Amino acid sequence: MSYRSIFDGGILRTEFEKAGINTHFIHTIWKFVIENPNCEWDEIPSLPSVVYPLLRSKFKPLTSTLHSAIQSSDNVTTKLLVKLQNGSFVEAVIMRYDTRLGKYCGKPRPGGPRSTLCISSQVGCKMGCKFCATGTMGFKSNLSSGEIVEQLVHASHLSIIRNVVFMGMGEPLNNYNSLVEAVRIMTGLPFQLSPKRITVSTVGIVHAINKLHTDLPGLNLAVSLHAPVQDVRCQIMPAARAFPLEKLMNALHVYQKNSQQKIFIEYIMLDKVNDEEQHAHQLGKLLETFQVVVNLIPFNPIGTLSQFNTSSEEKVCSFQKILRGTYNIRTTVRKQMGQDIMGACGQLVVNQSDTRSVENTGRMTDIEDFGL
């Protein structure tokens, strides 16, 4: 028999309502499971007697297990390999920062050590982006809301998570209902993450963007743009054919008007593909009417699967200067983290041989992460 995750909130709530059980006990159960992930249901105190047989018959505290946790050589990145109850695997990545080690506008930054969790929403991905290892897996299945939230539970036992970014395996907006329910659980009791600390990244699923602000107000939207013109975008992102750049930009205009929030633009730097000065000017003109932060991402090699090369530092710097100087667009360069454990941006693809454990919890200088 297949059991549901206790963090499949919608199903759990429906079962409680059918049985006439007050749903406020759900938060009590979640808090206990977060603190005691290997618990038995009978160990949870002070629940109505009718709750226990219901939980035993239909739910498990966690339906997934942490198969391995691999630490990067710089001690700031940990890649988690999570095994689902159907035997599939997904990956998540913990990235550790210390805001006090950086500066903002020439002044010391406030804050201290914190961690961001990069989370998966699907097993594999159907978008087929040619620079991304996950795309080589093809699409296997959607994760339930509980399977998404369980990644946060596993990570919370390794580090205190302040930010969550949906930038792991899968296209989050292609698993829309589970995404929405998972985010609502994360922002409610007992997790209580701020929506401002959660970022959802998408290749540009227009019909989902059109309803995202209504369903999840306050969170951050990041768009994997990666090219300033449609033909180049289609060349490196086959799914872009279904979402023409003009329609995507129109949807983003509406989103920004309704949300009154900045939009984060992700732009991978591919040598001789999208990193020339003309591309920088095209991107600047495309975005000049928006309030955006552009994050330039040096391409992370994906072994023998790579058909691209990484742009030189000089090209990345020149690209950044054009966007900043000519178009006054705030532009950052993403720090490369976790390359040695294949945990960097675009490198997530299931490798079940990853079995090393994690002990060190080092810190690094802050970067412009999307949770801010």
Image (cartoon, helix red, strand yellow):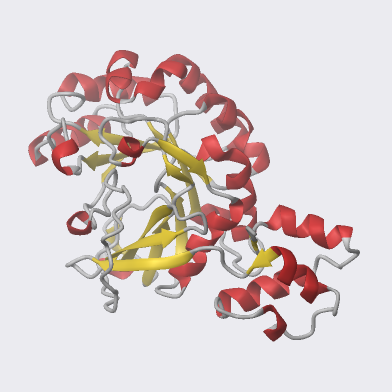
Report the label total. 0
Image position, residue 250 (x, y; %): 51, 19
Please provide percent x and percent y for residue 80. Answer: 36, 62
Viewer-closest of 166 and 162: 166
Q: In front: 60, or 270? A: 60
Q: Where is residue 267 drawn, in percent x and y?
A: 30, 34
Q: Determine the image quadrant of residue 260.
A: top right
Instruction: Please say if 236 is above or below 345.
Output: above
Quarter of the figure with the N terminus: bottom right
Residue drawn at (15%, 43%), measured in percent from left and top? 303
Q: Is residue 353 above or below residue 259?
A: below
> Left or right of 230: which side holds 61?
right
Q: Residue at x 43, y 24 (%)?
A: 289
Q: Is residue 31 visible?
A: yes
Percent x, y for residue 172? 50, 41
Q: Is 155 drawn above or below residue 315 in the view shown?
A: below
**Residue shown at the point (19%, 42%) measured from the top left:** 302
Q: Nearer the viewer, residue 134 or 251?
A: 134
Residue 133's quadrant in the figure?
Answer: top left
Residue 98 appears in view: no
Vertical placement of 315 versus 5: above or below?
Answer: above
Residue at the image point whose x is 36% and y is 53% from the top = 369
Q: Quadrant of the C terminus?
A: bottom left
**Residue furthest front in the image:** 1
